[in-house]
Image (cartoon, rainbow, N blue to C red):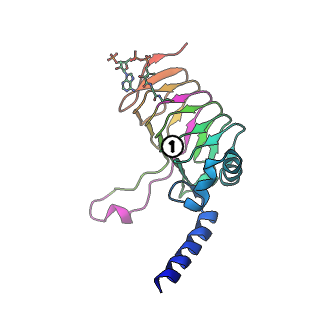
Amino acid sequence: MPGGMLLSEIYNQIKYNIKADRIGPDIPFTHWRLYFRSTMKKICTKKFLYFGDGAQFRAGAYAVGCSKIKIGKRVVIRPNTMLFGETNDPLDVSITIEDDVMMGVGVQIYVNNHRFDTSKTPFIDQGYYPDEAVVIRNGSWIGANVIILPGVEIGECTVIGAGSIVTKSIPPHTLAVGNPARVIRKIE
Ligand SMILES: CC(C)(COP(=O)(O)OP(=O)(O)OC[C@H]1O[C@@H](n2cnc3c(N)ncnc32)[C@H](O)[C@@H]1OP(=O)(O)O)[C@@H](O)C(=O)NCCC(=O)NCCS
C-alpha cells in the first residue's frame, strides 16, 4: 500500500540521516538542527572531527565526510558551501579550516579527482586518484563562490578573490584572484 511504503521510506531515511557522515539540505532529518544555535553546535560537534568554539555551520551548507573535516574557532560556513571531504584513502584529516578563517557563501572544497587514465573504460568505473587534503591556514579570507581543488594549501592571512578557482597552493600574506588563482600582491 503506497502510504505504508512512504512511511517505511521515511523511517529508513531517518535511520540513514542520523548515522550519515554528512550534513546538508539533502539530509533533512539532521539539517533542521542547523536552524537553532544549540542544536547546530551539538550536531556539528558530534559529526565533525573538530568544531571550534564560536564556529557556525549555517542551514543551506553541505558537508560530506564530516568525520575527516576540521572547522576552526570562529569560522562560519555559509549557505551553498560544499565541503566535500569524503576520502577513499585513509586520510586522517581531509579538510582543515583553521581558526578565524572567513568564508563567503558558495565556497566549494574538493579532496579527490576521478581517474581518467583511459577513454576505453567509462570514467565512472576507473575509481579515484589518491586523495589530497586541503588546508586553509589561520585568518585567511576566502571570497564567495571560490573553488578549492585537491591538495591546495592556502597560507595564513591570505585573501582569495570571489569566484576564483584555486588549483595550486597559495603562499601566506598574499592576495590571489582569478581562474586559475594567481597571486597579484603581498599583504604586509
Ligand atoms: C579581491 C578583492 C577583495 C579586491 O581587492 P583589491 O586589492 O581592492 O583589488 P582590486 O579591486 O584593486 O583589483 C586588482 C586586480 O584584480 C582583479 N580582481 C579583483 N578581484 C577579482 C576577482 N575576484 N576575480 C578576478 N579578478 C579580480 C581586478 O579586476 C584588478 O585587475 P586589473 O589590475 O587588471 O585591473 C575583491 O575584488 C573580491 O573579490 N572580494 C570578495 C568579495 C566577497 O566574496 N565577499 C563575500 C563576503 S565574505
Q: Residues within 10 Å of mark 1 (few under 14, many from 20)?
A: some
Q: Residue 126 falls in which quadrant of the image?
A: bottom left
State the residue lying farthest toward the left.
120
Q: Position of residue 185 (x, y in %)?
A: 45, 16
Q: Position of residue 100 (x, y in %)?
A: 64, 30
**Quadrant of the image for the C terminus?**
top right
Q: Is ligand 1 less than 8 Å from the beta carbon at label 1?
A: no
Looking at the rendering, the stretch of residues picked out in magenta corresponds to: 118-143
Circle 1 SS class: loop
User: Residue at coordinates 34% horizontally, 56% vertically from top-left?
Assistant: 116
Question: Which three-letter amino acid code belongs to the residue tagged 1?
Answer: Pro
Instruction: Decide which of 8, 77 is in the foreground and name it.
Output: 8
Q: Main secondary structure of the magenta part?
A: loop
User: Residue at coordinates 58% horizontally, 48% vertically from top-left?
Assistant: 94
User: Residue at coordinates 53% horizontally, 25% vertically from top-left?
Assistant: 158
86 on left or right of 40: left
Q: Is residue 147 above or below residue 85?
A: above
Q: Is residue 88 above or below residue 157?
A: below
Q: Is residue 101 magenta?
A: no
Q: Quadrant of ligand 1?
A: top left
77 on left or right of 183: right
User: Residue at coordinates 50% horizontally, 58% vertically from top-left?
Assistant: 26
State the residue lying farthest toward the bottom.
1
Residue 90 visible from this viewpoint? no
Residue 26 visible from this viewpoint? yes
Q: Is residue 142 magenta?
A: yes
Q: Position of residue 1 (x, y in %)?
A: 48, 87
The residue carrying mark 1 is 79
